[in-house]
Amino acid sequence: MPDDLPEPDQAAAQQAREAAARLEDEAASGLDRAAAHCRVAAERFRAAEVPRGTAHAWAALGHLREVEHRWRSRPGPTASRRASSGGASVPAVGLPEGLATILERLGIASRLSD
């Protein structure tokens, strides 16, 4: 490396990667909780327990909103993008492209930004 260029700070880079990984772990945990509530909601609706099913559906939405809020709060890309599959428009919420596409197809993405 030329003498006039600084050495990369490997420790700082590792810390940044670890911080990013922790954010992704937290997001995955929140999405796991949302998925669990969706499964319970489906069971409750099938058992004609509509109030309980509705409560779990709302709980799932709450977990999705929490994850979405954390993603909006972190640094990263927020520009609208075109999804690689089908060219669907992805909302500018800073979500990973695949997740944003899934939420959009489920009709949830617009409710998250309200």
Image: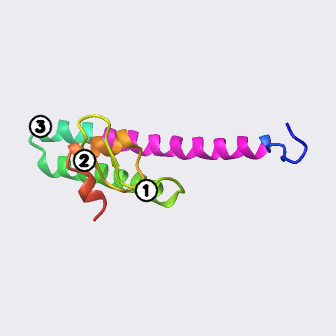
Q: Which residue is mark 2?
A: 104
Give the spatial CA distance, label 1 vs label 2.
Answer: 16 Å
Callout in the foreground (1, 2)? 1
Q: Which mark is residue 47?
A: 3
Q: Is residue 89 left or right of residue 11?
A: left
Closest to the observer: 25 or 13?
A: 13
Closest to the observer: 34 or 91?
A: 91
Magenta residues, start to end: 11-36
Residue depicted at x 53% and y 57%: 74
- Count neighbours of disc 2 (C-alpha within 10 A) and say few if under 14, some if 14 to 19, many if 20 or more: some
What amino acid does circle 3 point to? Ala
Give the spatial CA distance, label 3 vs label 2.
Answer: 28 Å
Precedes in sequence: disc 1 or disc 3:
3
Callout in the foreground (3, 2)? 2
What amino acid does circle 2 point to? Glu
Q: Is residue 8 magenta?
A: no
- Say which quarter of the image contains residue 105: top left
Q: Secondary structure at mark 2?
A: helix
Q: Secondary structure at mark 1?
A: loop
- Count neighbours of disc 1 (C-alpha within 10 A) and say few if under 14, some if 14 to 19, many if 20 or more: some
Q: Which residue is mark 1?
A: 78
What amino acid does circle 1 point to? Thr
